Amino acid sequence: MTKKILITNDDGINAPGIKALVEGLKGLGDLTVVAPDREQSASGHSLTLQRPLRISKRAAGWYVVDGTPTDCVFIGVNHLLRQEKPDLVISGINRGGNLGDDITYSGTVAAAFEATLLGIPAIAVSLEYKRDFHFATAARVVREVAVKVLDRGMPADTLLNVNVPDLSWDELAGFRVTRQGKRSYSDVVCENRDPRGRRYYWIGGEVLPGDYLAGTDAADVHAGFVSITPIHLDLTNYKALEPLQQWEWSI
Ligand code: MN
């Protein structure tokens, strides 16, 4: 039976990454795009509850929502594709990596989280932030990952966070299954004045070159490998359970 694939992103429906993703997945199944009408990067796992949402049909199989990536998956699965739920949700191709701690801010990864909550296998795919943006490489990578997931399924409550180096296909060092790493940023708040003389603030911060921990997403992407990190939603720190249970609780 033809597989149904729901596609979304956080860079917005007009971003080059989502076009490359659709191109790369052609022939793999019925593709439905449900994407935000504008850039929603760093929107995290935000769900719009305080105002109505509008859906407009852009073309056959292409829908735009004036909300977040999480809204798009929620509406895609529970409304637009409610008769036949998707077999797979793919979010991306994000313009810039989602490595280490970044994934907690990422709208791209959050869309995949939402699919996982709805019981649908999901892949988030991001392309390292450099100059060239080899979206075609990332599209070919995600096709390969998608074929495997459709064929083998995924462990429960798990999504795949895929990060692709900004290289041509032939330059890739290979594929690595990795763990979530750490990234450090210079924490910058830029202060300036608007044309009316009022102060405004802009959150910035560059990625600091650091020592990458071996076996992590950031280290392997830096070394030219495609990084595939299995992620789940259980945020419990199991190592902290016992020490906290030892505290003297009153009752
Ligand atoms: Mn983005």
Image: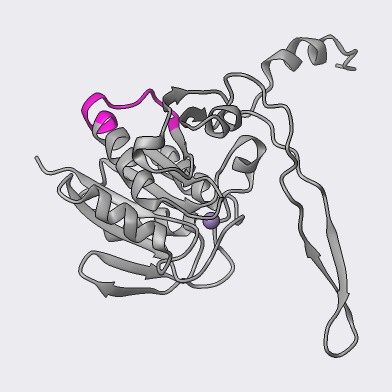
For the point 35% across and 39% down, the residue is 169
Residue 152 is covered by the magenta coloring:
yes
For the N terminus, which image quadrant?
top left
One can see residue 12 in this view: yes
* Residue with the most extreme bottom position: 196
Q: Which residues are magenta?
A: 148-159
Residue 100 belongs to magenta span: no
Any part of residue 119 in sight: no
250 to the left or right of 118: right
User: What residue is at 90 percent from the left and 17 percent from the top?
Assistant: 250
**Rendering quarter of residue 60:** bottom left
Residue at position x 60%, y 51% in the image:
44
Q: In the figure, 152 relative to 110: above or below?
A: above
Measured from the top left, where is residue 32 in percent x and y?
A: 26, 57
- Residue 43, picture quadrant: bottom right
Residue lying at the far left of the rendered structure: 1
Residue at screen point 48% across, 55% down: 132
Q: How many marks?
A: 0
Horizontal side, residue 146 vs residue 163: left or right:
left
Q: Nearer the viewer, residue 175 or 160?
A: 175
Q: Residue 247: percent from the left, percent from the top?
A: 88, 13
Residue 241 occupies quadrant? top right
Q: Nearer the viewer, residue 229 or 44?
A: 229
